[in-house]
Amino acid sequence: MEVLRRGSGGGLLAAVVLLLLAAAVSEVSAKRWTVGDNMGWTSNVNYTVWAEGKHFYYDDWLFFVYDRNQMDVLEVNKTNYEACNSENPLKNFTTGAGRDVVHLNVTRPYYFISGKGFCYGGMKLAINVEHLPPPPSSSPLNEKSSASRSTHIRYTPFVLTAVFAAARALIW
């Protein structure tokens, strides 16, 4: 009976610790962009306008939501992007589910189109992925409390492993 009481109290404490640490880690995680927001990846949407003012950073994700029976998501080079040529894509991200994810893990320009003629209706997206800018150095107080998002993301697996190990130790 004593073991059960001790175990359940530790489990509650572990859950609280996990919740607090997960909230702290989520603030520095990469951003997931739903392409076209609530319109998704479809015709008659101006994706150039959608991308204006947005900053796409290393380790962000693009989430394409579309009609899987009609459209696709193709990465192409700049020339094929401008010509809406889907003949030789660099990569076909179409999985058949209509919910495709692209990890932006290289800092460079990316060009996406939908083939089958939909590119001519505006289904094309060009973005530039860059490194997250360093935090401002003019404020010494903020320098200690803020670090670049990419540094935090790099250490996230280690932090989560340590958190789960600590929680397990508390439960047992």
Image (cartoon, helix red, strand yellow):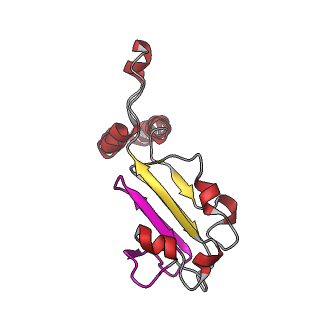
How many marks the image carries: the answer is 0
127 or 17: nearer the viewer = 127
Residue at screen point 67% across, 74% down: 43
154 or 86: nearer the viewer = 86
Residue 146 x, y percent position in the rendering = 42, 26
For the record, the magenta segment spans: 85-113
Residue at screen point 34% across, 55% down: 106
Q: Is residue 138 above or below residue 65?
A: above
| 89 with respect to 82 (left or right) | left
104 or 99: nearer the viewer = 104
Confirm whether the magenta stretch covers residue 109. yes
Q: Quadrant of the C terminus?
A: top left
Residue 45 x, y percent position in the rendering = 68, 66
Residue at screen point 45% across, 47% down: 30
Q: Quadrant of residue 69?
A: bottom right
159 or 61: nearer the viewer = 61
Residue 2 x, y percent position in the rendering = 41, 37
Q: Is residue 136 above or below residue 104?
A: above
Residue 164 visible in the displayed image: no
| 92 with respect to 66 (left or right) | left
Confirm whether the magenta stretch covers residue 64. no
Residue at screen point 36% across, 43% down: 153
Q: Quadrant of residue 166?
A: top left
Residue 79 x, y percent position in the rendering = 43, 71
Q: Is residue 123 above or below residue 8?
A: below
Residue 57 visible in the displayed image: yes
| Residue closest to the far top | 140
Q: Quadrant of the N terminus?
A: top left
